[in-house]
Amino acid sequence: MNDCGRHHPHVQPRQSRRRPGQQRRHHPVPEHPPRVAAPPQAGAALPGLGPVPVLPPHPGARRQGQDVEHPRTRSQDRHPADQLRQPDGLHREGRPARRGAQARAGRTAQAGTRRAGPSGRGCPVIANPLLRRATFSELFGLLGLPPIKGTSCPCPFHEDKNPSCSVFIGANGHEIAKCFKGCFCGDVYDMYARAFRCDRKTALMELNHKLGIAIGTFQLDRPLHGRFQPVPKSTQRDERLRPSLPLDLGDDRMVVDLSTVRRIHEGGVRLALERGLLGFGNYMGRPAWVMKDRSGLLMQARRLDGRTWFRDTKAITLKGSDANHLLGVEEAGEADLLFVCEGGPDMLAAHALVHEMAMLKAYPQEKIAVTGLMGASMRPRRATLAGLKAKRVVIWSHADEAGRDGAKEWKRCFWSKDRTVDIIAADEILAGLKDLNDVVSADGGLAAIIKKLMEVRHG
């Protein structure tokens, strides 16, 4: 039968779920109670009956306009300490307590510390100064740091010119500090644990003891983190960690192999070896040639066979090295002409150029010094350049954007009133070449370099 009540040949009749002989159930419709007029107010006059008498309310009865209040939760029946409760959900040790721990704490606590409410959720505790949590303002004062202004402050774990640490209230109601540089994120006890190099439990006890929150005897002479220890400004680099590698190799065979790999004259390799800027040793199980100087502040190793170490890494700077140290600056004190190179291969090529100029008697060998930085992004320190007496400085720049930008920055560092600084790029000597090593190893490269030096000198 279709919607119109007629039989349709393609529509199946609906099957009934009632068993044979079963009657249809009729659910009775509930009757609404009759509306009754509101009870008269106390003191109101009723027609024919007079005023309604005013009776004293029952202690447990519902008051007009108020909800039913349990006798234990009424203000007149509460303990005086309940007025000092804090809705921060903290237990005795200053951490958020679980529901089971809250129930046990509520059964064993003293008067005034019982659970509030039938479910016990939240489990507030008394605002007792012996049970509260430490704050970041108190910890900053303890560490001798400037006070927190607002919600931002300088991070105590790194040099911070602009405030990068934010102090806010977390989801558990505790103060949380987060450094957006990524060096710290945690509460006040985590910061104390990191500052004093201890675990969280020890930090909780010690900080509470120092602030008068808890009473006990703990190790209070724990050394501070190095970030908070006063460091004298006159700290010398000699007192710090230096790179170390036994340079127990070095014979004529290695000199020949290195000159063959770098495609330069053997005299340049021997000159760098005599001046103490080159050494040979085993690094990571491989024979390597190492650029270094007498100060021992910087050591960079390359494989002697010309291959890379791993993942196309050509050179490895040893741990403890000062990357901004100018190699050979101590040996360049009495030189008149100073070469500044980028990387170890260019320093070897510069020594080959010095050897060639000495052979041609174009310039005395002892009056030319070769220095170098191990990357275009490195910057020489002005304190190390104060003792240089060279009146002319030539910077051999790489023919790429990073090399040119680095050479411009180096020129600003080396410039002085009684010193001239020139920049010579590799492609200015021979087109299509990248660095000084490529120019020296090319046919006619040494002659082109000497010619370019003369042009710059007289120009």
Image: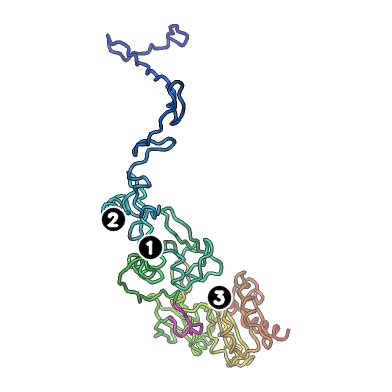
Q: Please tell me whether residue 231 belongs to the stretch shown in magenta.
A: yes
Instruction: Please tell me whether mark 1 sits on a helix, a strand or a loop.
Output: loop
At mark 2, the secondary structure is: loop
Q: CA distance from mark 2 to mark 1?
A: 16 Å
Residue position for label 3: 378
Q: Position of residue 336 (x, y in %)?
A: 63, 91
- Residue 129: image tag: 1
Indicate whether 122 appears above or below 354. above
Q: Which residue is nearer to you in this view: 116 or 324?
A: 116
**Tags 1 and 3 in contact by the CB under 8 Å rule?**
no
Name the mark nearer the viewer: 3 or 2: 2
Q: Is residue 444 visible?
A: no
Pointer 2 residue: 109
The amino acid marked with disc number 2 is: Ala
Picture layout, residue 367 above or below residue 164: below
Going by the numbered disc 1, the residue's amino acid type is: Pro
- Looking at the image, which is closer to me, 454 or 206? 206
Question: Which residue ends up furthest to the top in the rendered image?
Answer: 6
Q: CA distance from mark 3 to mark 2?
A: 64 Å
- Asked if residue 262 is among those painted magenta in the image, a careful observer would answer no
Magenta stretch, residue numbers: 229-240
